[in-house]
Image (spheres, grey):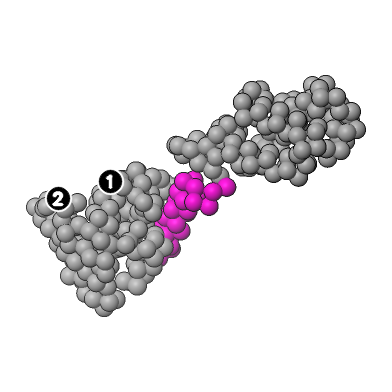
Amino acid sequence: MRFIEEVVVDEFLPTFRALLAGDLRDRGLTQSEVADLLGISQSAVSKYAHGDVDTNDRLAGDERVQDLVVRLGAGLASGDVTPVQALVETEVLIRQLERGDVLARLHEETFPPLTEYEGDFAVHDADSEVRTAERVLASVRRGVRTLENTSGFAGLIPAVGSNLVETLPDATGIEDVAGVPGRILDVKGRATVPGDPEFGVSEHVATVLLAARAGGSGARAALNIRYDDEIATRFAEAGLATAEFDAEASVETAVAETVTDDVDVVFQSGGFGIEPAAYLLGADAGVVAELVRELL
């Protein structure tokens, strides 16, 4: 695990200080004066100015970095810019370069797992795509662990297998829904999970959940289980609100037309070649997993 702050320290700071120290020396300031302005030692200034410190060519060649060096160099040399102002201006540039820019790219190169996330993002952003997606994946992992440790859950798994899924807050398609790759299966009375949760791996349960949301449900998670009269009785005893949809109709249309915002379970009682199934809905994967415990 490598933090973006390490990239700033290892790549940005040596490069920026070397450029700024060189600019100030070119303006006639002594090593002592440069050291005082930058808050570093004279020996460090000497190393920066003489190229004895490794720098990053991509950062050194960035026009924004070069422009800030020139602007701060002129301001610090003339006294128009204070060291505090110089620090603030530099921090602003760092934050900018971290947001889907050159520092973010350098971070991805030194920490490859980040490359799984497409588009521009800022690691520090509380609402970043990375943080949101990882929280959803973590929620599904917790829910799956709950199911694995719930005695009797395997008996609720239908012949086609179960899947526990959860959507991103603004999900629009299956690729925005995290679930178990393949299906959770009943293997000799034990729920068996084939792999770690991923996005875009559950077409059927994800489709039902998205359709429920399109119909007005606020649920962000769902789990499919088997359905029969006994299960229907358990729903009633647990006080769960249910709604039935036509198994032989389009899932997207049938579920969306059936669900209301207070429905906890949508189900279909089967059809030609179609196994009866129920879909538990909840705010997140953990809530749905707890619903299973209430049914057992």
Per the rendered image, the range of residues in magenta is 124-151
Q: Amino acid at mark 1?
A: Glu
Position of 236 compared to 1: left or right?
A: left
SS type, badge 2: loop
Residue toward you, 187 or 127? 127
Percent of width and height locating residue 294 = 35, 72
Q: Amino acid at mark 2?
A: Ser
Task: Tell me what residue is drawn at x 34 percent, y 43 percent.
Answer: 175
Task: Tell me what residue is drawn at x 35 percent, y 68 percent.
Answer: 291
Task: Tell me what residue is drawn at x 53 percent, y 52 percent.
Answer: 126
Percent of width and height locating residue 246 = 12, 58
Residue toward you, 50 or 75? 75
Q: Earlier in the sequence, mark 1 or mark 2?
A: 1
Residue 20 appears in the rendering: yes
Residue toward you, 271 or 30? 30
Give the distance between the C-alpha atoms of the residues marked 1 and 2, in whole angstroms: 14 Å
Magenta segment, principal secondary structure?
A: helix
Q: Which mark is residue 250?
A: 2
Percent of width and height locating residue 260 = 22, 65
Residue toward you, 138 or 158? 138
- Mark 1 lies on residue: 203
